[in-house]
Amino acid sequence: MKRFTNPRDIYHGKGALAALKDFKGKKAVICVGGGSMKKFGFLDRAKGYLEEAGMEVRIIDGIEPDPSVETVMKGAAAMQEFGPDWIVAIGGGSPIDAAKAMWIKYEYPDTTFEDMCKVFGLPKLRTKARFCAVSSTSGTATEVTAFSIITDYKKGIKFPIADFEITPDVAIVDPELARTMPQKLVAHTGMDALTHAIEAYVSTVHSDFTDAPAIHSIEMIQRDLVNSYNGDMTARDNMHTSQCLAGIAFSSGLLGIVHSMAHKTGAAFADLGAHIIHGAANAMYLPKVIAFNAKNAEAKKRYAVIADYLHLAGANEDEKVASLIAFCRDLSEKMKIPHGIKFYGADSYPTEQGFVPEKVFLERLPSIAANAILDACTGSNPRQPTQEEMEKLLKCCYYDLDVDF
């Protein structure tokens, strides 16, 4: 038996933020990140709508990119003090992911972060509050998913929290919010969305229910991502929809080792002064993983189906897989995303020598590979890598080498 879970309600289209006016409750907390939602007026608008609904509103702001365990615990303590019956997270993946983890701790104060990370092991939520996610970026799709990513900076590892309990009750997908994204964010979040859809389509737990949104999302991304990157606002609006469809696909269809590696490399070199941004990591690793997984006959067949939907060249499955890899690399080229960690600059742009020195990478490689194998996303990958294979794959991702094993 498989399960397909989404938010009960998804409000979408221009002006969807106004759905907050109809929420029923006494107290709401709004979780928000840096300054963009405040700067562009969306935070005040959301607060006003909730107050119009008759609720007392508190704000938890300043949630950082790649939110930490400490941020989660601090926010949960604020919720305990205030006692909201609605948690509304507005912004990109970081504030929404942080708010999901805060929600768990708010409802179960004795829960540790280690408890949260037990895959599909959470107790029943909604004993104190319901959850609404309002997405402002077009990539993570955390507004519709059963996942949250929290970083333990002491370990230098991003940990996924995975449980259908943290699927939001309500998702608001209003394209007006995504129009504020800077160009680099459009690129990274778009490649994150593409990775979500492709990994969900070849996952070992895919189904007809996940295949349909995955494929349509991929088709829309092919049509709209580069145009969105280049400033076409109609394409930007479309990308906000397509990334949500990708989220619907992977929340129930799960992911694979592109995400396993992205989770375990993202903060692994933070002591060197930068992170490997999640969407950029996915963009660099996706072509390598497609080549690796295509050694599995079923995965190869499904990659070829994706190529067919995208009208890519190829007389047979091998040629179609090669075309799909080339398509992914071409998107990165057009949006100034490097092809390997060695060439990943501290500002995320391509450079001859990135911020991760070869010596440091090789020293940390065994532990990164071991942690990637243990990641929650690895189990649904169509081909299970050994420690040796994972290390070789990560080397290909560092040096931008072809995968032939």
Image: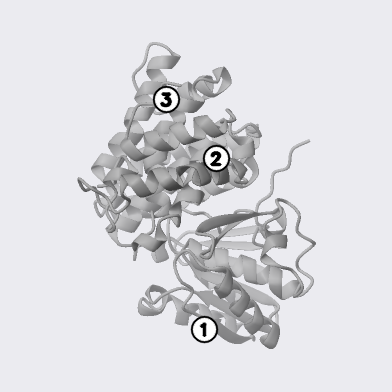
Label 2: element kind: helix
Distance from Cα at disc 2 to Cα at disc 3 = 16 Å
Q: Is residue 58 left or right of residue 394?
A: right
Between discs 1 and 2, the one toward the N terminus:
1
Specify which label sits upstream in the sequence, 2 or 3: 2
Q: Residue at x 58, y 86 (%)?
A: 58
Q: Position of residue 339 (x, y in %)?
A: 30, 40
Query: Within the image, what quadrant is residue 11 found in?
Result: bottom right
The x and y percentages for residue 331 are: 30, 39
- Can you tell which mark lies on residue 48? 1
Query: Helix or strand or loop: what does disc 3 sit on?
Result: helix
Q: Amino acid at mark 2?
A: Pro
Which numbered disc flags the more N-terminal residue, 1 or 3?
Answer: 1
Q: In the rendered structure, are the residues bearing label 1 and label 3 in contact, judged by CB atoms less than 8 Å apart?
A: no
Instruction: Tell me which residue sits at (47%, 47%) in the image.
Output: 262
Residue closest to the eye, 345 or 214: 345
Other-residue count near label 1 (Cα within 10 Å), few / some / many at <14 / 14–19 / ≥20:
some
Relative height, residue 100 to residue 79 (above, below): above
Which of the colour schemes (rainbow, by chain, secondary structure, one colour) is used?
Answer: one colour
Q: Which mark is residue 381?
A: none
The circle on residue 307 is: 3
Q: Residue at x 34, y 50 (%)?
A: 235
Label 1, label 3: how many angstroms apart (C-alpha)? 46 Å
Residue type marked 3: Ala
Mark 2 lies on residue:
213
In the rendered image, the vertical position of residue 166 relative to residue 329, given as above or below: below
The front one of 222 and 36 is 36
In the rendered image, the residue lying farthest to the left is 352
Would residue 238 be visible to someone looking at this image? no
